[in-house]
Image: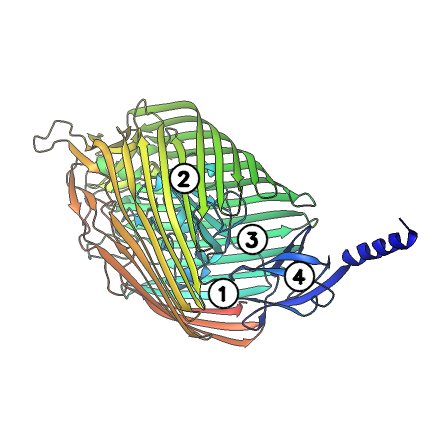
Amino acid sequence: MSVKTLLLLFGFSCAFSQNENVKGTVVFENEPVAYAKIDFKGAANYTTFSDKNGRFKISMPHGTYKLKVTSLGLKVRTQIFQITSTNKDDVKLVLVEDLFGLEEVVISATRNRVNKKEAPIIVNTLGAKLINATQALAVSESLNYSPGVRVENNCQNCGFTQVRLNGLDGSYSQILVNSRAVFSALNSVYGLEQIPTQIIDRVEIVRSGGSALFGSNAIAGTVNIITKDPVLNTWQVGSYFGLVDGDTPDRVFNFNTSIVADNLKSGATFYGTHRNRDDWDANNDGFTEMVELKNTTFGIKFYIKPTDLSRLTIDATVLNEYRHGGDRLDLAPHFTDITEELTHNTVMGGVSYDFSNEKNTNNYSLYSSVQYTDRDSYYGGLGGGTTVQDSLTALNAYGTTKDLAWANGFQFTKQFKRDILTTGIEHNISSTEDIIVGYNRLIDQNVNATGLYAQYEWKPNTQFSALIGSRLDYVNVDGIYKIGDIERDVAVSQTALNPRLTLAYQFTDDLKFRGGYARGFRAPQAFNEDLHISSVGGEPQFVILSNDLKPEYSNAFTGSFNYTKDFKTTQTNFLIEGFYTSLVNPFALVSTGVQFNNGSILEEVRNGEGARVYGTNFEFGISPSKKWLFQIGGTLQRSAYETDQLLFEADGTNPNESDILISEFVRNPNVYGYLNTNWTPSERFSLSVTGTYTGEMIVPLVVSDSGFLSLNESPAFFDLNINAETHFDFSEDFQLTLNAGIKNMFNSFQDDFDVGATRDSDYVYGPSLPRTFFIGIKIGKMH
């Protein structure tokens, strides 16, 4: 080969591999999009970000690339892009709004960041738009707006709430904070009402056993509360004022601010909120149906990137909450007939360090998160009595609780050309000590759980994927449970292997199928409802674990079709999902009819013969334009025991009382759903109409001192809300938002509360609030 030929080949090679400085802008509605991520995938991969003015610049060789642009709240844009010497300047990338949030990045599906539309498991997200539309003040008020999810209030005296996923009660769900299992059994009693929505970026919900890799006890699913990340330099101060039933004030003041370095290497978010709500009596019997509530929360979330391939994140939240219900709240609790008074002091925080190799194919994560709660409580009162024993019992109903949850773990993720391998180890510690000396009540429980998990996402082509994984859990429970002269001990060491399989097939760009199986188990221990003390017949009602309680197992199957289609400017989304969960040795609560000398009633957790929960979730949304959005979703389901389950066990002393057996779960409607609509005629004004539907259900009512029950059928409820909002941009650094509206505008609310000192405080169902009028204001640099 001649020298001339070699020189020609060398010159051609240099020309072909020549790098060009590709420059352009990312825009949305002719406005620049700051910090959008721009990926070029070809023979080699390149990534850059737009600056605060939407501009980007990157040096790359000539060639053909698959371009992908992502930005928070906007639809992902993908296209084939060819870089040449004449096609490199003034590249304009136009994005459109993701009105249904279908292309958000979520982490609850696979424990890795993944586009929600591409995720092998269905993940529903509740974000700032919905929270603002519903004017939800706490996490518990927003969760109803997702298929298969229902939040209920379970106590007139203290406002105990629990979230039900796919018909299973709260103890079957795992509550995560920033993907960490630091929401203990005690937090699950009141925690969903303690966390203000103002600190939340979004809530991710995974139904059924698809979330098994977060923990084997996530039988019904997970609720993952993601707190706000610092993204832009913003600040905001806001206030809310509501009148419950037109006369009971509910006041909220909040602030948040975010600071981000110009090079995006570090940032911090600070937030705080204070809520002060008066108590409310629905039927003028002198006893509360809604508790007095005072909540103050402060927190910070901080990150720093030591290198381009690593990130250290630290978050901390301090929470103080006081809640008080019953009668004559101005008196000391032991002088009243019924009082439940609680003061929670909670500290919650975590640290995580994430890093990867230069090719971003190996990702590592180390984390540690902790929650500690110190609680003072009072559960009791005179119960309408006037004897010396009544006074003595009431005087000794004060209690203390110490609760610790600590989660530590390591995760490794390997990214192959298409497939993804995820492995990890977690160690969770939970310690609860709950003491009420006057009742000789003690829960001293320590749970240590170590989990090993592995998951492989196989993608042989662009249409099919299989998620194959398993979690091996070793759980050690050491607990002492006392009430009166009854004592139970639990010493369990259990190892369980819980497999998970999910298949996904993309029939077309618009139609996707997902189907899966997961196994779960729960070791015998005190869960959220077991720590709650209710009032019946003027006396407290306690829960204790039975002797020889066996572990509970579950097998969960799901199948779904998701159709998403854009017709020019119209965005649509339709989801239908079937689910079937079988429970082996399910934990069931039985009212024993046993009374202690002080009149207290005993309920016992026992194993049932078996149960199954099955049904269909659906969701439909259409948005003809940015001005209009319509969304409706709901659940049709059944929750049944394999054989009739004992609910009340007669002690034989009263001939008019006999055992009560049930074939279906109580407090569980077969139909429930939600509505979400929004009209935004201009950038300055929007109108939101939202609502929830709760179908008929069976609700137990205690009608005697022994705990004998009447099974009552509740009516159906439709809770409709309206919120009008106007927005003013005075400058780039100062905006004002005003809003006003009505919650439960038709006052669809329970009207047969039990009354007086001997009432059953657990006889509560339906919407959590009567008709409530509200106004709000926010000022700051909000975008």
Mark closest to the chain's N terminus, 2 or 3: 3
Gap in angstroms between the C-alphas marked 1 and 4: 26 Å
Q: Quadrant of residue 701?
A: top left
Q: Is residue 338 above or below residue 633?
A: above
Residue with the mark numbered 3: 300
Q: Are marks 2 and 3 in contact (CB under 8 Å)?
A: no
Mark closest to the chain's N terminus, 3 or 4: 4
Residue with the mark numbered 4: 82
Q: Is residue 702 above or below residue 28?
A: above
Furthest residue in direction right, as rendered: 3
Mark 3 Cα-neighbour bin, 10 Å: few <14, some 14–19, many ≥20 = many
Instruction: Tell me residue 427's x, y (percent).
Output: 52, 32
Gap in angstroms between the C-alphas marked 2 and 4: 40 Å
Residue with the mark numbered 1: 97
Instruction: Tell me residue 470's x, y (percent).
Output: 48, 32
Left or right of residue 83, residue 494 in this image: left
Residue 156 is tagged as none
